[in-house]
Amino acid sequence: MITSLLIANRGEIACRIIRTARKLGVRTVAVHSDADAKALHVRMADEAVHIGPSPARESYLVGERIIAAAKETGAEAIHPGYGFLSENADFAQAVLDAGLVWVGPKPDSIRAMGLKDAAKTLMADAGVPVTPGYLGEDQSPERLKAEADAIGYPVLIKAVAGGGGKGMRRVDEAAAFMDALESCKREAASSFGNDIVLLEKYILSPRHIEVQVFGDAHGNVVHLFERDCSLQRRHQKVIEEAPAPGMDEATREAVCGAAVRAAQAVNYEGAGTIEFIADASEGLRADRIWFMEMNTRLQVEHPVTEEITGQDLVEWQLRVASGEPLPKRQDELSINGWAIEARLYAEDPAKGFLPSVGKLDYLYLPQRPHHADVRIETGVEEGDEISPFYDPMIAKLVVHSRDRMTALDDLADACAGVACHPVRTNAWFLARLCDAEEFRDGRVTTGFIGKHADDLTAHPKPSDDLLQEVAEHFISALWSDESGYHHRTLRFDRGLSGFRLNRAPSFKVTVQWNGQAVPIEFDMGLYDRGTEWEPSTGSIKDTDEITVFEDGAYFDFALASRGKVGAALSDGALIAPMPGKVTSVDVSAGEQVTKGQRLLTLEAMKMEHGLVAPFDGVVAELNVEAGAQVQVEAVLARVEAAEK
Ligand code: ADP
């Protein structure tokens, strides 16, 4: 087993790898850019090396700097994580040339799968079904057009060097083909420096099914079953699960068997994923699932496979890289229960998924004891920063349950339980997805989010119950204000029922939310719960402002208006902020009082509230006696400052 490991990555995956390395007694070395100098992966590792400025191009993508860092720290091996240099065959080769262990497949395997056309040809030769289409060398527009006509529309034009959903064009009719081809080639040339394209039948009702495979240096290859990643936004995965809904045993065997053949065809070592596209118009059928591409690295969504198989895939990677055989044989692997992962991002779905960068002043990720079964994979903690330089992922939330429905419920709960401020997250969007009927029925295709975008991304609104709690907060905050000086005041507009003894009265409390004045009809009958309340998932409180979290979203409320009450208070007036009964008067007019001294007691909302002197001075005005009923905003007393 290797004894030391440099992790050429950042964020959650770097932390994830460090955790397993530590479990195995492997010393860890982190690398970091300027922006990540204090990042969690740096704090977790045994050692850390600064490799350059914040932009990834100048740090995490600079192979020589990373290899030099491994040399300097005596690290024996390099784990690339995912993204960055993980699928760069030249970097893998350079690592090997430097005499280091590369935790990944051989550079040749990466190269063989690097271009989509070559990979498809290789797969077809290995007996793996590939999406019907044209892979030809003749790239003349006329020939491509003729092939597209023969395939039948819609067709998909794909740049062979494309990735991340870029360099793809769907063409729905022959007349649109030439323009689409031209623009696809232009994009491919500028993004990938290679304008060669292939054509594919565009699969309607497509589902994304992928199979986790693993190979070792001794010629063994196994699969760890499939994942379904059909819930995508612009070809980016949002929620992933394992196993795939509706996958029967025979179909599973066919697909996983094809995946193993695919890995064998490139003498695969380490963790890899074979991605398939399925035409799910009539459910999952073995003859309608085709090879799309191979990812020659550990995937973001590997935890769902770990959960259903009970394996640690990073441990497998480190063992295989150390020359050990695979920890399990195929017949020792089986599926247990259902696992689903959601990618929690710092972005605002209501604003076109605009990244929301900045400091995580407040961050609560679901955890024990409220959410016992959630696994969190994260690279940040409260107080850390989501930087504009990298992928704004905050965490992955992974649940593992006995069946799919329970897992979906657990994940919905977990997403709804996320509380983050002031950075915006997609937690509420994820929670909505978990509750979406079509998803629960296992019927989603890759177009689901696009089709339902309006409903799924509509701005969250606070519930009526939440508004009641907010009103209650302002009312009790007012009363418990330590200074006793009601310089921060609520504006109470009496509700229609007013204050009557024989029925629960109601008030209108006007608060500010999202730049609007929101009147809340506050039902005093609900006040029984007492002053100390907590919204279900927490809050950040201040007398003037409150942030509350609900269903994965947050809402900032502020008092709407200080109005005349505020003005009156500035001269030391004690105002009744709500109707009530004066139960005692502890001072007399003209008396010297000190700051904080209790002057009156008011009973309102079934509780007694002491009104205290806002500063040292004399009681200049005393307008009530014990037993008096007072109305809201009544000036009960006035203190004049001592200096005057
Ligand atoms: P990339 O390398 O850019 O990620 P892929 O070939 O993996 O490109 O495809 C990305 C996504 O595009 C898939 O997950 C799927 O949603 C969609 N897609 C790819 N090929 C087809 C096809 N032939 N028909 C319909 N959708 C497709």
Image: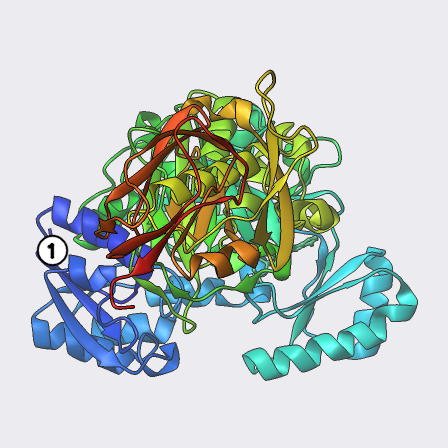
Foreground residue, 375 or 292? 375
- Quadrant holding ligand 1? bottom right
Residue 12 in percent (x, y) is at 32, 55
Foreground residue, 151 or 467? 467
Q: How many marks?
A: 1
Left or right relative to 230: residue 213: left
Considering every residue shown, the one lying at the far front of the view is 590
* Vertical arrangement, residue 330 with respect to residue 573, above or below: above
Amino acid identity at mark 1: Ile
* Vertical arrangement, residue 185 with respect to residue 431, above or below: below
Q: Residue at x 67, y 30 (%)?
A: 437
Residue 472 in percent (x, y) is at 48, 36
* Vertical arrangement, residue 411 with respect to residue 167, above or below: above
Q: Residue at x 58, y 53 (%)?
A: 513
Mark yes or no: residue 195 visible: no
Q: Name the element at disc 1.
A: loop
Q: Residue at x 64, y 34 (%)?
A: 436
Residue 273 in percent (x, y) is at 45, 49
Q: Which quadrant holds the C terminus?
A: bottom left
